[in-house]
Amino acid sequence: RTRSPEVLSNVSRPTTLPLRIPPRISITQADSDRFTLFDYETENGVSPGHTPLGSQSPGLTLHTSFPQGQRRESFLYRSDSDYDMSPKTVSRNSSLASEGHTAEDFIVTPFAQVLASLRSVRSNFTILANVSTPTVRRSPLGGVCVSPRATLSDQQYQQLALDTLEELDWCLDQLETIQTHRSVSEMASNKFKRMLNRELSHLSEMSRSGNQVSEYISSTFLDKQNEVEIPSPTLKDKPMSHISGVRKLSHSSSLSSTSMPRFGVNTDHEDELAKELEDLDKWSFNIFRVAEFSNNRPLSCIMYAIFQERELLKTFRIPVDTFVTYVMTLEDHYHGNVAYHNSLHAADVTQSTHVLLSTPALDAVFTDLEILAALFAAAIHDVDHPGVSNQFLINTNSELALMYNDESVLENHHLAVGFKLLHQENCDIFQNLTKRQRQSLRKLVIDMVLATDMSKHMTLLADLKTMVETKKVTSSGVLLLDHYTERIQVLRNMVHCADLSNPTKPLPLYRQWTERIMEEFFRQGDKERERGMEISAMCDKHTASVEKSQVGFIDYIVHPLWETWADLVHPDAQELLDTLEENREWYLNTMPQSPSPPPDRHLQHDRFQFELTLEDLEHNNHNHMQLSNNGTGRSKRSSRKAISSWSTTPSSLSLSLTSQTHKKSLESVVCCLIFTTKTFHM
C-alpha cells in the first residue's frame, strides 16, 4: 500500500506493514484484504508504504484471508518487544486477540519481514524518483500505478524520504545479524525460542505446577545443543556395528501370497475390523478399536491397509509375504509393556501421516517414492523405544547414549533398528528398488525420523514458517516445492505434526493418549526416584498436574505448529484447529482451581531457571536502551548480544550478562535491572 497524498501529511512509523497477498501451494488472484507484518522487533517497525501485491499463476497458493475472530492465535503472534508488558503480553491464558487482523494475516518470521520491508522501500522509491514501475517477473508486485511526485508537497516528499531511509536502515540492521554459516530460518528459530522462554517464565511464576509444566516444555522442546559449541567426543573404542534391540524372529514360514489374511493379520473379528477400516482416510479414525479387532496388531494391519489402498506394493513390486513379514517383525520390536511409545502409537502416527499426505492442497505434490518414505518413516519412528526420554538415557550413561554421542539418541536408534530389520529373512521390502531409489529413500527416511526428536521442534517450526511466509512476499506467493530442501521440509513437518496430533483428535481418543503418556512419564519418574536421581519435569506422580500440562502443551507447542501447517494447506486443516481449541477448553475447565502457595524462600533453589536469549548477534552497534515513561524499557533498533538468566520468582531475581559489549555498557546493565525489578513487582 503506497501512501496517498491525503495521509502523507501525518506520517508515523507503525509496528505493522499492510500488504495484499493471499497463501496455498499455486496462487490465485490476490485477495483484496490485506495482511500485516509484525516487526522483527516491534520497536523497529517498518514504514507503511507498500505496493499492493496481486497476480495470478498456477500452483500451490498460500492464503491469508480468514474470518476475523475465528479462533485464538498462538503466542508467535504476540509482540516480540523484549520490554512490552502491555495487557496483551501479560495475559498468560489466552493468546493475543485479533484487532482487525487474524493470526494468518501477520508475518512473524524475520527473513520474510525483511523481504516485505524491502518491497516497501522499492515502492516508495518509485514515488521519490517519479518513475514508472516495471514488471518484476519474480515478484508478485508486477506493474502498478503509483502516485507521481508532482502530487506530493515538499513536506510530504521529505517525510516519505525519511521513512524510506529508516526502513532501509532497519533492513540493513537485520541483515547484519545473519551469520554466513547459518540459515535465514535460524533468525526465526532464535526469535521463537526467545518468545517461548518469556512465555514460560510467566507461566512458571503462577504456581508450582506451572513451574513444572514450564520446565517440561523447555527441557523437552527446546534444543540447547548449540548454546555451547563444543564438538561431541568420538568414542573410537566403541563397536558401532552392533545395534542393540534387534531380535531374530520368524514370520515368513506361515505366510504366503495365497493364504494371506484379508487385512494382513489373523483375527477372529474380521467383519468388525473391516468396519473400522472404512474410516482409514479420516482424522477421527479409532486406532484403539483397530488394535482390539486385529489381535493387537494395529501397526501391521494399518500398514497393510494403507499400502494396499495406495497400491504401493504394486508400484514398487513389493512381495506381499515379504511386506507382511517385515511389518510384523517391526511391530514385534515395539515394546508392548511401554505405555505410550508402542506399536499403537506407531500405527496412529502412520495413519495420521497417510491422512496428511491425502490433503487436497498437497494433491500430486509428492512422488510415490516420497510417499513410501514418509509412511515407512512414520512406521519405524519409535521402534524399540524403552519408555524413557533421551535425557534419561544420557543421565544414566546408557549404551545408546554412548553410541550416539548424546545426540538424538533414540531417534538414531529407531532408524538403525528399522533399517537393520530389512536384513532379516524375507524382510527386505525394498529389494526391487534401484540403487538410486534406495539411496534417496534412505536419505528421506533419516531426515524425517530425526525430525521427530522433540528438542528440534522449534527449529522445525521456524523453518516451515519462514518458508511459508517468504513465499507470501516473493515469487507471486507460489510454493513450488521443486527443490529437495523445500520438499523434505514439508515432509519433516508432516511427520512431526502426525507425531504431535493427539490433541487434534476427538476428545475420547485424546484423553486415552494423555493417560498413556502420563503413565509412561510416571514410570520414568519412579525409576529416577529409585536411582536417587532428580525426577524429570511432569514425571513425578505425586506433584504433576495433568490438566495444566495439556493446556500448556497445546498453547506453546501444538497450537503454533498446527497453526503454521494450517496456513500451508488452508483450508484443509481448519477443522483440526477447531477440535484442538475444543480439547484445550475441556482440559482448562477440568483443571483444579487451587490457590497458589506463598513463596517459600527455602525452596527458591528448586525453582527452574529460564534463559531469555535476547539475540545472538555478532556486532556491537546500536546496543543502547531507553526507558519509557511508564517504567518499561524499549530498545531502538538495538543489536544486542546478551543472555539473561531469570529466576522464576521475584524474591530470587538474578541477572547475568555474558556479552562483552554489555559488560562494558553500564547503561545497558542498569536498564535491564530496572526493567527486571519493575516486571517482577508489577
Image (cartoon, rainbow, N blue to C red):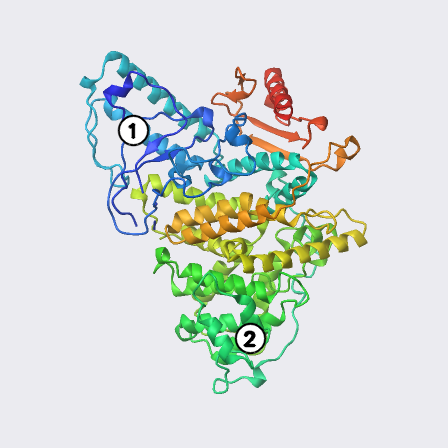
22 with respect to 490 (left or right): left
Mark drawn on residue 293: 2
Mark 1 belongs to which amino acid?
A: Arg
Whether label 2 touches label 1, CB < 8 Å: no
Residue 414, compared with residue 103, is above or below; it is below
Residue situated furthest top in the rendering:
154
User: Toward the viewer: 419 or 651?
Assistant: 651
509 with respect to 156 (left or right): right
Residue 184, compared with residue 406, is above or below; it is above
Asked if residue 299 can be seen in this view, the reply is: no
Q: Secondary structure at mark 2?
A: helix
Residue 623 x/y as whole percent = 53, 21
Residue 403 x/y as whole percent = 67, 57
Which residue does the numbered mark 1 point to in the structure image? 122
Q: Which is more N-terminal, label 1 or label 2?
A: 1
Residue 527, compared with residue 70, is above or below; it is below
Q: Where is residue 22, by image quadrant?
A: top left
**Mark 1 residue crowding within 10 angstroms, few (<14) / some (14–19) / many (20+):** some
Q: Quadrant of the N terminus?
A: top left
Q: Secondary structure at mark 1?
A: helix
